[in-house]
Image (spheres, rainbow, N blue to C red):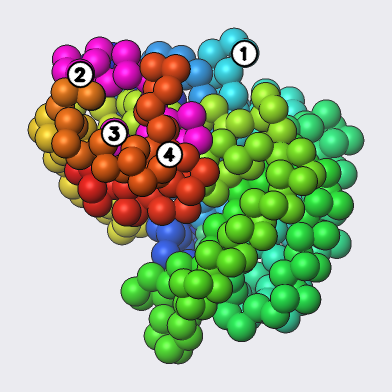
């Protein structure tokens, strides 16, 4: 599979505050670096040619941490790169999503916004190092609706340190009250090098994480959301097209500090060093993907989806029949009721979605 990438990820690394759990490529906002960064970013994006993309996703960092003029410059540069009818997403933190920024997004053709809410609890927000309050999330959602952006995601982080049942229930109520069509729910994972890790804060036990996940599943399904990926829930028709590219393991261009991309048979990662990036030394790692790794990665990502993958898609990508190549590996999983092969597709069962690691350990 060598087709040209149809998706573009753009990373804006600036944040006004640094959160205690954060492992993303980011730097504290400093105005003097913004223009040089954007100049280098635009050069990098242009180096991939002038083609248009079906999806553009601006993530961070905090894209909305930029001042209005810089934010507008960014959106004006990206807007002509979007195919007609494409999906244009921007991540926003509630406290910096102003009416002006919402209007600029609408004007530039942004049609999906993802808000980093995480939790509604004052105690937990302060523990995470987030500077917003739930009321600002409500305000951000209504400002987006006022300008005509209805396709909104809210991030929900659960299994936070010592999160009580009451706090969890409050979050569930608060998130449902927003009435947005997409919710991403992730448990807190503590990576090396984060402030939490250095303070010795531990992740909640696995059984508590699993218990909360199953409660989320029940709550969100009860409210009319469909789980289409392990951590992602949407009202019908509001699935994120950009993230589907990752989960289907398709090609995409990634630009900006620490961004990753997958083009032809090469995966690459950009530098996390701001100075190097600004100097135009964008790339830090490049790896040619062999057929074995390609197949493994395909299974890891596609089986996160409730719909799994089509046997035809596997055949046309690898020139091999899944049922022959993985004979002896998939049957026990089908026997245990973890994997389903039906309607020409391979997908995890309801039980399998909770035990993906075990499926993948057996399959790859
Ligand atoms: S706002 Fe996001 S990127 Fe910035 S420090 Fe917090 S978690 Fe990290």
**Disc 3 to disc 4, how far (Cα)?**
14 Å
Looking at the rendered structure, the secondary structure element under dot 3 is helix
| Above or below: residue 94 compared with residue 210 | above
Crowd rating for badge 1 (residues with CA inside 10 Å; few <14, some 14–19, many 20+): few
| Residue 208 visible in image | yes
Q: Which mark is nearer the camera, 3 or 4?
A: 4
Q: Are marks 3 and 1 in contact (CB under 8 Å)?
A: no
Between 272 and 39, the residue placed more toward the observer is: 272
Q: Residue shown at 26%/27% (left/top)?
A: 263
Answer with mark 4 or mark 1, whichever residue precedes in sequence: 1
- Is residue 302 located in the magenta-colored stretch of the structure? yes
| Above or below: residue 60 compared with residue 322 | below
Looking at the rendered structure, the secondary structure element under dot 1 is strand
User: Which range is magenta?
Assistant: 297-321
Q: Which residue is mark 1?
A: 85
| Above or below: residue 302 compared with residue 165 | above
The image position of residue 36, as x and y in percent, is 43, 47
Looking at the rendered structure, the secondary structure element under dot 4 is strand
The image position of residue 267, as x and y in percent, is 23, 37
**Res 348 label:** 4
Q: Which residue is mark 3?
A: 298
Image quarter of residue 200: bottom left
Crowd rating for badge 2 (residues with CA inside 10 Å; few <14, some 14–19, many 20+): some
Q: Which residue is mark 2?
A: 321
Q: Residue shown at 20%/18% (left/top)?
A: 321
Image quarter of residue 194: bottom left
């Amino acid at each position: 599979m060598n087709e040209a990438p149809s998706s573009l990820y753009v990373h804006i690394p600036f944040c006004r505050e640094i959160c205690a759990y954060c492992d993303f490529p980011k730097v504290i906002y400093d105005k003097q670096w913004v223009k040089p960064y954007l100049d280098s970013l635009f050069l990098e994006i242009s180096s991939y040619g002038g083609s248009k993309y079906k999806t553009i996703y601006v993530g961070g960092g905090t894209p909305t941490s930029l001042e209005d003029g810089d934010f507008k410059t960014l959106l004006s540069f990206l807007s002509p790169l979007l195919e007609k009818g494409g999906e244009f997403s921007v991540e926003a933190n509630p406290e910096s999503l102003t009416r002006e920024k919402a209007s600029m997004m609408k004007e530039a053709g942004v049609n999906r916004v993802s808000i980093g809410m995480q939790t509604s609890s004052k105690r937990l927000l302060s523990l995470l190092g987030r500077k917003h309050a739930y009321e600002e999330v409500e305000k951000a959602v209504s400002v987006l609706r006022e300008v005509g952006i209805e396709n909104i995601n809210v991030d929900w982080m659960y299994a936070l340190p010592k999160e009580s049942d009451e706090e969890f229930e409050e979050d569930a109520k608060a998130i449902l009250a927003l009435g947005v069509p997409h919710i991403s729910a992730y448990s807190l994972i503590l990576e090396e090098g984060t402030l939490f890790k250095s303070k010795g804060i531990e992740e909640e036990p696995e059984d508590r994480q699993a218990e909360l996940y199953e409660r989320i599943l029940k709550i969100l399904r009860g409210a009319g959301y469909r789980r289409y990926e392990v951590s992602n829930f949407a009202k019908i028709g509001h699935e994120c097209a950009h993230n589907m590219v990752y989960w289907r393991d398709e090609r995409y261009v990634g630009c900006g500090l620490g961004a990753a991309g997958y083009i032809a048979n090469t995966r690459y990662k950009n530098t996390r060093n701001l100075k190097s990036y600004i100097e135009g030394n964008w790339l830090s790692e490049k790896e040619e993907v062999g057929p074995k790794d390609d197949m493994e990665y395909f299974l890891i990502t596609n089986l996160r989806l409730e719909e799994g993958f089509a046997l035809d898609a596997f055949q046309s990508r690898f020139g091999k029949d899944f049922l022959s190549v993985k004979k002896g590996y998939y049957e026990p999983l089908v026997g245990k009721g973890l994997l389903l092969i039906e309607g020409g597709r391979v997908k995890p069962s309801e039980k399998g979605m909770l035990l993906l690691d075990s499926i993948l350990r057996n399959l790859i």
